[in-house]
Every structure is written in C-alpha cells, then in structure tokens.
Image (spheres, rainbow, N blue to C red):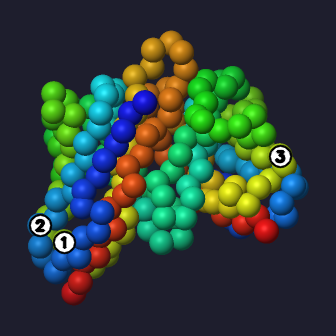
Amino acid sequence: ETGVTQSPTHLIKTRGQQVTLRCSSQSGHNTVSWYQQALGQGPQFIFQYYREEENGRGNFPPRFSGLQFPNYSSELNVNALELDDSALYLCASSSGRGYEQYFGPGTRLTVT
Amino acid sequence: KNEVEQSPQNLTAQEGEFITINCSYSVGISALHWLQQHPGGGIVSLFMLSSGKKKHGRLIATINIQEKHSSLHITASHPRDSAVYICAADGRYSGGGADGLTFGKGTHLIIQP
C-alpha cells in the first residue's frame, strides 16, 4: 500500500505566474483535502474533493482551484501568484468524509 | 467557525519526563486529530478520536466531549519525540460540505537527553 505522495517537492515561482501542484492519494482513498501552511503557522483548509466533486472550501479566493481525477489523484492550481502564497502546501487523503486523513510530505512553494 | 487553542506553545523537558499537551475547541466536532510534524514539513497522524481514550505505544490521547478538551500524553519521553504536535478539529458534516480540519498553532516539544 503506497502512501500519499506530492510533487514537486520544492518550487520557486515569480509573482503573477500560475502553478500546479499534484497529489497522489493513498490507494483506496476517494477524498482529498488541500491545506496551506505558512511559516510558523498551523495549516489552513483550502478545499476538499470527494469523488471528483468539490465538497467544501475554506476562506481562499477563486484563484485557488482544484481538480480530482477518476483515479482520485488531485491537483491544486493557483493563478496570479502573490508573495503571500509562499507556503508549504499539504494534501491529505482519506477513505471518506470524516475519516482519518493521511498527509503527504508537502510541496514548498516560494513566490519571489 | 471552530477555534482551536493549544497549550503550551513551547515545551522543553528532560528525557524520561511525562509530557502533557492540551487542546481545547469552541464548537462541537465529529472527531479530534493529533498530528506530529517534524522539521521539513511531513505530518504524521497520531490519533483520531471522538470519545474516550486511545493508546499507541508511549502515546496516549484523551478527549472530553462535554468540556471540549483533549490531551496528548507522552510517557517516558525520548529525544526522538522532539517535534511539533498539532491538534485539529474535524467539524460535523451538515450536508453543506466539508469545513476541513481546523488546526491549532502547534506545540513545539524539545526533549533533551
């Protein structure tokens, strides 16, 4: 059974650019949540996908968007990057809504 | 919106000491998670509990639903336990979609040999 994986590990982008982060869920998991963790802070909920549909969203602007694919892998897209988007982005998969979440290692995004 | 508070924010202890980290939340939840985060970012789920007590090795987690309070205990602490410990509240699903986990700010634990 493979765990949750994320790619890339690190990424440097320029303000105004767009970025796509990827997450591969643990086998058998149909739910994925994305979180943003700024330096020194706890993670903040971005959104959750359940069976390819957005199932809930935190207080993030529309330039944060996502996709979940039929194999339950997922993408987080951020448009018009801002300096404050610099953070560790974590995805977590689970076998359903309200079940234990298994976290990936994260993607560290730096916006310059 | 749930507010999750953790204490202490920082804790330094000697190897072998009994450690307690506290977590309180403001509104009803479906479950409370305890997570461990090491430098570099990776998060490991330690416990998910909705009532009572769970034990795994030297780690014990308890929750009091009525008081909206949970504790994480580490017995016979060891330097390898040094990490950030985070509690996170999982809201109830009301049909309006997920709220995701609401995280505390974490407790930075250092166990000195």
- Name the kind of residue labelled 3 in the image: Asn
| Residue beneath the point at 63% across and 60% down | A87
Q: Circle 1 sits in a helix, a strand or a loop, which is it?
A: loop
- Name the kind of residue labelled 1 in the image: Ser
Q: Residues within 10 Å of mark 1 (few under 14, many from 20)?
A: many
Disc 1 to disc 2, C-alpha distance: 6 Å
Q: Nearer the viewer, mark 3 or mark 1?
A: 3
Disc 3 to disc 1, C-alpha distance: 45 Å
In percent of width and height, residue A67 lies at 75, 34
- Name the kind of residue labelled 2 in the image: Phe
Whether residue A99 is situated above or below residue A92 in the rendered picture: above
A10 and A71: which one is in front?
Answer: A10
Whether residue A32 is situated above or below residue B59 in the rendered picture: above
Q: Which residue is mark 3?
A: A79
| Residue beneath the point at 34% across and 68% down | B108
Q: Which residue is mark 2?
A: B18
Q: Which residue is mark 1?
A: B77
Residue at the extreme right of the image, as rendered:
A17
Disc 3 to disc 2, C-alpha distance: 47 Å
Sequence-wise first label, 1 or 2 = 2
- Quadrant of the drawing holding the N terminus of chain B: top left
Q: Circle 3 sits in a helix, a strand or a loop, which is it?
A: loop
State whether discs 3 and 2 lie on one chain: no
In percent of width and height, residue B111 lies at 25, 78
Q: Residues within 10 Å of mark 3 (few under 14, many from 20)?
A: some
- Quadrant of residue B92 in the image? top left
